[in-house]
Amino acid sequence: MNIAIYCGSSLGDHENFSNATKQLANEIAQRSMSIVYGGSSQGLMGIISNEALRLGVSVTGVIPYSLIEKEIENRAITHTHRVQSMSERKNKMEELADAFIALPGGYGTFDEIFEVLSELQLGKHNKPCAFYNINGYYDKLMEFLYACVDNGFMKKRFVDMIIVSENPKILIDGLQAFQPIKSKWE
């Protein structure tokens, strides 16, 4: 399984973000899976890629030319795809991935994971999507998504389809056990 990892180019304010990211890399290595990610050597992107490489995981980076210097491209990774835009980055990562995990991050991380969640809802793919809920990072977002359900703007099954855990083993088990869902229009 090739897992797309969406995460920040920042480390966050708690050491636990880095430690938990290393634990996820270890779980991926134990299961002989591979990673596709944003190609940076900075922040959680740097932690996941460098730890995965140290553990023998194949790591593919996808980075726009405009970010090569800003995000400081990780030149140690197994494969690199350099693309023209953020849209191309997302498309390439989606193409290469069998599943998606969002770690803590900001707007870029949210943009990436919400695009694949929306496409899953619309039936454009049947790949599992997950939130790695380090330090309860995604608790408030999940509350908000269920509020969208309560207000009639989302169907509950499209929130329930998101795998959410702070435990990397449970997260990967959930990705592997994922069953395709009916699209919004079925």
Image (spheres, grey):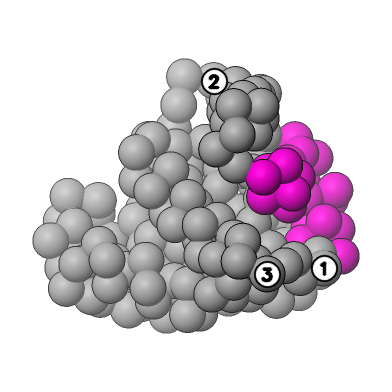
Q: Secondary structure at mark 2?
A: loop
Residue 149 to residue 103: above or below: above
Q: Residue at x 51, y 57 (%)?
A: 118
The residues tagged by marks 2 and 3 sit, at their Cα atoms, a distance apart of 43 Å
Give the dominant element type of the magenta stretch: helix, strand or loop.
helix
Type of residue at label 2? His
The residues tagged by marks 1 and 2 sit, at their Cα atoms, a distance apart of 34 Å
Q: Split into 4 quadrants, where in the image is the C terminus?
A: bottom right
Residue position marked by numbered label 1 in the rendering: 179
**Range drawn in magenta:** 155-177
Where does the image place residue 163, in percent across and percent down from the top left? 74, 48
Residue position marked by numbered label 3 in the rendering: 186
Q: Secondary structure at mark 3?
A: loop
Q: Residues within 10 Å of mark 3 (few under 14, many from 20)?
A: few
Whether residue 77 sits left or right of residue 27 in the image: it is: left
Whether residue 169 sits left or right of residue 2 in the image: it is: right
Mark before the other along the chain sequence, 1 or 2:
2
Mark before the other along the chain sequence, 1 or 3:
1
Q: Are marks 1 and 2 in contact (CB under 8 Å)?
A: no
Q: Split into 4 quadrants, where in the image is the N terminus?
A: bottom right
Which residue is more in the foreground, 43 or 165?
Answer: 165
Where does the image place residue 172, in percent across and percent down from the top left? 78, 57
Residue position marked by numbered label 2 in the rendering: 14
Q: Residue at x 72, y 67 (%)?
A: 182
Q: Quadrant of residue 167?
A: top right
Mark before the other along the chain sequence, 2 or 3:
2
Q: Quadrant of residue 14?
A: top right
